[in-house]
Image: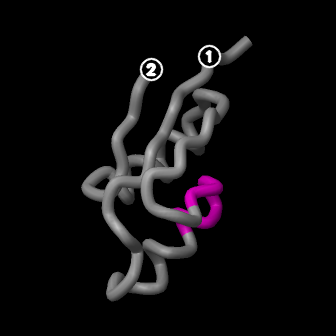
Amino acid sequence: MAGQIKVTLKKSGIGRKEYFTKVLKGLGLTKLHKTVVLTDTPEIRGMIRKVSHMVVVED
């Protein structure tokens, strides 16, 4: 069973390319300072890596 990770949105998607906002929406991050708990999978890690400059990850 995969672990869980907490992801918090720290920077807004406003003014960013549409790709970044779609990735954030896919992660369930719609508002600033929103935190979601996600399953730690390679797919989720890849999405987080694409927006790593906008989020904070806690294991």
Quote the CA–CA distance across marks 1 and 2. Answer: 8 Å
Look at label 2 and name its amino acid.
Asp
- Neighbours of disc 2 within 10 Å: few (<14), some (14-19), many (20+): few
**Which residue is at the far top?**
1
Task: Look at the image and tell me in which quarter the N terminus lies.
Answer: top right
Q: Tell me: 58 left or right of 27.
A: left
Q: Nearer the viewer, mark 1 or mark 2?
A: 2
Residue at the image position 61 percent from the left and 32 percent from the top: 41
**Residue under circle 2?**
59
Q: Tell me: 42 left or right of 54.
A: right
Q: Tell me: 6 left or right of 17.
A: right
Residue at the image position 34 percent from the left and 54 percent from the top: 10
Look at label 1 and name its amino acid.
Gly
**Residue under circle 1?**
3
Residue at the image position 34 percent from the left and 41 percent from the top: 56
- Residue 42 sits inside the magenta stretch: no
- Neighbours of disc 1 within 10 Å: few (<14), some (14-19), many (20+): few
Q: Residue 29: where, in percent of width, then height?
A: 56, 58
Q: Residue 17: where, in percent of width, then height?
A: 38, 85
Q: Which residues are magenta?
A: 23-29
Mark 1, secondary structure of its residue: loop
* Mark closest to the chain's N terminus, 1 or 2: 1
> Do labels 1 and 2 touch, CB within 8 Å?
yes
